[in-house]
Amino acid sequence: MVLPLTVKGGQKTDLTKNHPGLAEVMVALGWETDAVAIEIDAAAFMLQGNGQCRGDEDFIFYGNPTGRGGAVTVETVRVPDKACIKINLPAVPADVAKIAFTLTIYEGPQRGHTFGQVPGAYIRVADTGNHELIKFNMDGGFSAETAIVVAELYRHQGQWKFNPVAMGYHGGLAALCGSFGIEVADQPDSQTANPKPNQPAQPHNQPVVQPAGQPAGAPLNLAARTTPKQPVNQPGYGGSTNPAAPGSQASKPSGQRINLSKIELKKKGDKINLEKKANNKLGEILVNLNWNQQKQPKQSTGLLGSLFGGGGGGVDLDLGCLIDMKNGQKSVIQALGKAFGSYHSFPYIALDGDDRTGAVAGGENLRINGDHIADFNRILVFAYIYEGVPNWAQADGVVTIKQPGGPDIEVRLDEHDKRKIMCAIALIENVNNETLSVERQVRYFSGHREMDSAYNWGLRWKADSK
């Protein structure tokens, strides 16, 4: 008899190699919510080698209980587990490199719920006889996250391995779907927008696979609903979850719909893809820098005052970016040296002006020509203090990335280093020539050379002025 193995975060473990002949497994998840009425949903994403879903059918949850090929299905659960997903390993499509298992909090931002309020979360892998093979206890460590990639099953040299991840996301299910290439849309549900008098409200809105007749590739509608959620306290494992009959469970009020108008990347490494468009053309992507207009404190006029623009005027916080093109060309866009770029020709990025004081309501903007995805390799968005005291806390800077038809992506400069005048804010990278990913950085440097070296850009730098 093989004893179950308890693993820690990052401790990758052989599954099929340690259990020869294993064909089907049950991946069960559980958690505690104390006295707080927090609603948590589990899901699985079948991912390609690039970390993206091939299509909506590779997103498996109670609204789409059977994935592509029938290899991954939502199952009824056994106490004390709260969710269960069955994996038929031989039936997993050959193009699927790994299966990610996730937890998300329903309406977390609206209700003020986070995984910091959810102790005792775990995931365990069992065979069909419910003999536990692997268990991972997440042991807390979360604060404001509303979505978690708990663990992965992934292929390695013809075998399946288990990887305990415990990676938190902000933005809930919408951000999670975006990171795995599932497009979503925020539209009202006509069935629940104006419920009839004396009728119970419908169960809460959740993403659903596009119904028959809807154009292929259309975004998932996070405000639509087709079937209520199945109760999870049925004994035993067994067939797929079936929609509950009307009135078989207390319905949940629809509440506010998930807000897709803004997604904030709050922790270093938080990452999300921009929404894909037809013909891989994203249109104009606007990167906006705005900051506090308060005056900085009076400084001495000695050496340090000269270095940091002493004199007590407003801080001059400038926006710029490093560019690395697919053809090997590298450059910089910034007001310093009047390197304002060009939108319609190389480098297909333009800085629209230089706000010296923060008094311009629109701040400073980089315009990225998203119709030239294939020309970009990576773009590093940064801000630097050209004049004024390097008091990043008082500047209270925020960068917002605006995309056509998709949510704004916000990165706040809420981590500070008063000793350094430059901040790498976000790394934008090409994703298969189809879209661009945005990853939070917020790393501080003493100047251009130090930042260049940290990201291996390889440009030569010289002193210059506006």
Image (spheres, rainbow, N blue to C red):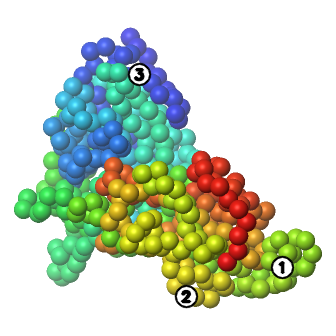
- CA gap between label 1 and label 3 equals 60 Å
Left or right relative to 153: residue 457: right
In front: label 3 or label 2:
2
What's the residue type where badge 1 is placed?
Gly
**Residue 160: % across, % down:** 34, 25
- The first of marks 1 and 3 along the sequence is 3
Residue identified by numbered label 1: 310
Q: Quadrant of the C terminus?
A: bottom right
Q: Secondary structure at mark 1?
A: loop
Number of residues whose C-alpha sits closer than 10 Å to that of mark 2, classed few (under 14), some (14–19) or many (20 or more): few
Find residue 278 and report its image quarter.
bottom left
The amino acid at mark 2 is Ala
| Label 1 with label 2: CB-CB less than 8 Å | no
Q: Residue at x 39, y 49 (%)?
A: 103
Write down the residue under mark 2. Answer: 361
Secondary structure, mark 3, is strand
Residue 400 appears in the figure: no
339 lies above or below 428: below
Write the residue at 43% across / 65% down: 346
The residue that mark 3 highlights is: 14
Is tag 1's residue or tag 2's residue first in the polypeptide sequence?
1
Estimate the spatial distance between the alpha carbons at disc 1 and disc 2, rounded to whole Å: 25 Å
Percent across and percent down for residue 121 are 47, 43
- Residue situated in front as seen by the camera: 119 or 377: 377
